[in-house]
Amino acid sequence: MTTKTTPDLPHDDPRKVEAMFGRIARRYDLMNRLLSMGMDGGWRRQAAKEAALKPGDRALDVASGTGDLAFEMARYVGKGFVVGSDLTREMVVIGHQKSLARKEKRVDHHVGDAMALPYKDGAFQAATMAFGGRNVPDLTGSFREMARVLAPGGRVVFLEMNRPKLWGFRQLFDFYFHRFSPFMGGLISGDRSAYEYLPRSVDNFESVEEIANCMRAAGLVDIRIHPFMFGATNLHIGRKP
């Protein structure tokens, strides 16, 4: 019997991250809808709006998964294009299949490493990451790479989960994520360990303020933060000078 490889904490070995997401790729979209109670689509739409893209622009979605945020950004670029880059080939394949099914020619899907993006300096007007920050080895380093591939004035938009601070809701959030999520994840995806990693990674991830500091350390300015669902999910926006 093969032992499943699952990360222990956020910023773990990328090989563990890639193996885990490869296993759950087929059920990834469904589990996102279920565990967020359908709200993740609205969060991504807001992230795409904050990217401030114009017709003809080029955008990059890092840790793109199956491409949901990349597809949202495609609505703004007109004859421009969006690249979705992800470490896990199985995710990229599903994203490509979704592009074909939607006849969406403005979105391309690449296998790529968030710590060493295979794109030229200044190639994009916006770079985004949704729910991938816990899975990169170095958060500041990933922001630095996103800033590198941005043209001056371009935006980094970062969407991620955090433990809420509001008393009562925080306890409810903890119960939901530590008990319900692993149960449903195991039932639907067949991989309970992946959905045990989810709450463990959120518990040990950088705080909202620390994320903003990581963005500043990467050279981004004018950092803004928009909380959703009492701070259970937060949107960080920064600009390349």
Image (tube, helix red, strand yellow):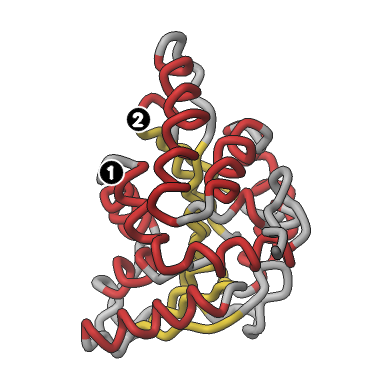
* Quarter of the view holding residue 111: bottom right
Q: Amino acid at mark 2?
A: Met
- Chain-order first, disc 1 or disc 2: 1
Dot 2: few (<14), some (14–19), or many (≥20) neighbours within 10 Å? few
Q: Give above or below for 100 relative to 32.
A: below
- Label 1: which secondary element: loop
At 74% from the left and 48% from the top, the residue drawn is 217
Q: Position of residue 66 (x, y in %)?
A: 42, 70
Q: Position of residue 89 (x, y in %)?
A: 56, 79
Q: Give above or below for 99 relative to 213.
A: below
Which part of the image, by quadrant, shows the C terminus? bottom right
Q: Residue furthest top?
A: 167
User: Would residue 180 appear left or right of 206 to someone viewing this image?
Assistant: left
Tag 1 residue:
39
Which part of the image, by quadrant, shows the N terminus? bottom right
Observer-nearest residue: 37 or 23?
23
